[in-house]
Image (spheres, rainbow, N blue to C red):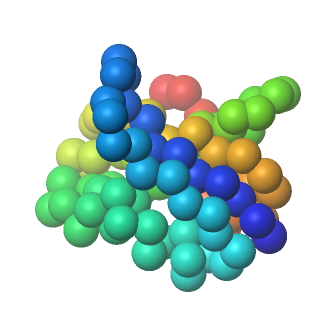
């Protein structure tokens, strides 16, 4: 499994974090993903598989009441043990 993860910021941001991960442990230890997961309002991560890359990583917070696009994903995202996002 090799996945490129690029942090998403709407608009221009000069420092966008990008990481390559080869395991789920590496994925969960990416600093900006870890920051979301450490936040007390964190609820769950989801993947969005699109027909073409980049795919998306969504973070739900506040008990699932809010969702944020936090990253673009490229590579074998089917290997990520995350639920597929279903818009509610």
Q: Nearer the viewer, residue 11 or 81?
A: 11
**What residue is at 24 percent from the left and 68 percent from the top?**
38
Residue farthest along the left direction in this orientation: 40
Q: Is residue 58 left or right of residue 83?
A: left
Q: Position of residue 22 (x, y in %)?
A: 70, 74
**What residue is at 55 percent from the left and 60 percent from the top?**
19
Quadrant in which residue 53 is drawn: top right
Q: Nearer the viewer, residue 60 or 55?
A: 55
Q: Position of residue 24 (x, y in %)?
A: 62, 75
The mark total stands at 0
Quadrant the N terminus occupies: bottom right
Residue farthest along the front direction in this orientation: 14
Q: Is residue 85 visible?
A: no
Q: Is residue 72 visible?
A: yes
Relative to 44, residue 15 above or below: above
**What residue is at 28 percent from the left and 46 percent from the top?**
61
Relative to 43, residue 67 above or below: above
Q: Nearer the viewer, residue 79 or 14?
A: 14
Quadrant in which residue 82 is drawn: bottom right
**What residue is at 81 percent from the left and 56 percent from the top?**
76
Q: Nearer the viewer, residue 19 or 29?
A: 19
Q: Is residue 69 left or right of residue 39?
A: right
């Amino acid at each position: 499994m090799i996945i490129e993860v690029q942090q998403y910021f709407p608009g221009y941001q000069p420092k966008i974090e990008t990481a390559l991960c080869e395991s789920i442990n590496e994925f969960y230890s990416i600093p900006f993903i870890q920051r979301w997961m450490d936040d007390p309002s964190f609820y769950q991560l989801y993947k969005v598989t699109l027909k073409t890359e980049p795919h998306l990583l969504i973070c739900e917070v506040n008990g699932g009441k809010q969702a944020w696009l936090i990253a673009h994903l490229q590579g074998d995202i089917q290997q990520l043990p995350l639920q597929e996002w279903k818009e509610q």
